[in-house]
Amino acid sequence: MKKKLLALANPVGLLIFLIYTITNRFITELPDSISIPIFIVSIILILIGITYSGYCLGKRKNPYDFK
């Protein structure tokens, strides 16, 4: 279960960031009290996903191999 969560952290972070950016630019301007926590959470998830992918690359594993 932990491997799935770590492997999916990067795509989820990117999806949250994409939804935040589209909403903020095209639909409505989000207030800072909402946009800053969303931005921080998405960046943290992206960094966790990048770190896990780098760890798997060093071990010569595929991070998305859920066997």
Image (cartoon, rainbow, N blue to C red):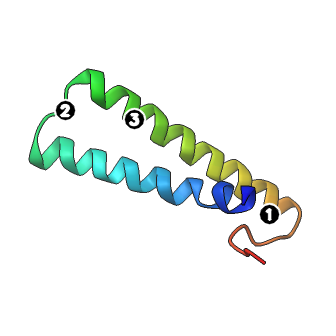
Tell me which amino acid carries mark 2. Leu
* Distance between the alpha carbons at the discs numbered 3 and 1: 27 Å
Q: Quadrant of the C terminus?
A: bottom right
Picture coordinates of residue 29, whole percent (x, y): 13, 34
The 10 Å Cα crowd at callout 1, few under 14, some 14 to 19, many 20 or more, is few
61 lies left or right of 5: right
Q: Quadrant of residue 39?
A: top left
Tell me which amino acid carries mark 3. Phe
Q: Quadrant of the N terminus?
A: bottom right
Q: Secondary structure at mark 1?
A: helix
Q: Residue at x 55, y 45 (%)?
A: 45
Tell me which amino acid carries mark 1. Leu
60 lies left or right of 52: right
Q: Secondary structure at mark 3?
A: helix
Q: Residue at x 86, y 69 (%)?
A: 60
Q: On the image, numbered disc 3 is attached to which residue?
A: 39
Q: Residue at x 80, y 61 (%)?
A: 56
Say the numbered circle drawn on residue 57: 1
As drawn, which residue projects farthest toward the left? 27
* Distance between the alpha carbons at the discs numbered 2 and 1: 37 Å
Lower sequence index among marks 2 and 1? 2
Picture coordinates of residue 43, whole percent (x, y): 50, 39
Q: On the image, numbered disc 2 is attached to which residue?
A: 30
Lower sequence index among marks 3 and 2? 2
Say the numbered circle drawn on residue 16: none
Q: Secondary structure at mark 2?
A: loop
